[in-house]
Amino acid sequence: MAITKPSNKKNQNTVIAEEFINAAPDGQPQRKGVKKGKREQISLTIPTDLLNQLDEVAEKLALSRASLINLAIVRAINTENKTS
């Protein structure tokens, strides 16, 4: 009997099994945020001092904390896109 090198090709059963697994709800990594309409809820941990400053600025601007965070993110992305 001759010694042969194993084939690198996947057999049909392996391909079918991989497709089945990848199609399962937990088959592919998914984002952890909770969908809320067109938005996605996330968890954010920041230092207490920074949170206090954030709340102060939000109050001065008559914005919610979430609105100010979203505004800051949009401004940061726009600034980065202008420099790229």
Image (cartoon, rainbow, N blue to C red):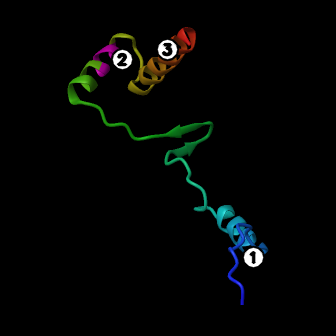
Q: Which badge, 2 or 3, is on the more N-terminal residue?
A: 2
Q: Nearer the viewer, mark 2 or mark 3?
A: 3
Q: Quadrant of residue 25?
A: bottom right
Secondary element at tag 3:
helix
Contact? badges 1 and 2 (CB < 8 Å): no
Q: Which residue is mark 3?
A: 75
Please tell me which residue is depicted at 27% across the width and 26% down the height of the picture: 51
Secondary element at tag 2:
helix
Contact? badges 2 and 3 (CB < 8 Å): no
The stretch in magenta equals 54-59
Q: Where, quadrant-wise, is the N terminus in this rendering?
A: bottom right
Q: Which residue is mark 1?
A: 13
Distance Cα–Cα, label 2 vs label 3: 15 Å
Q: Amino acid at mark 1?
A: Asn
Q: Amino acid at mark 2?
A: Ala
* Residue 34 located left or right of residue 50: right
Local packing at callout 2 (Cα closer than 10 Å; few below 14, some 14-19, many 20+) is some
Distance Cα–Cα, label 1 vs label 2: 58 Å
Q: Amino acid at mark 3?
A: Arg
Q: Nearer the viewer, residue 18 or 52?
A: 18
Please tell me which residue is depicted at 47% across the width and 21% down the height of the picture: 73
Q: Which residue is mark 2?
A: 58
- 57 vs 10: above or below: above
Please tell me which residue is depicted at 21% across the width and 24% down the height of the picture: 49
- On whether residue 58 falls in the magenta region, the answer is yes
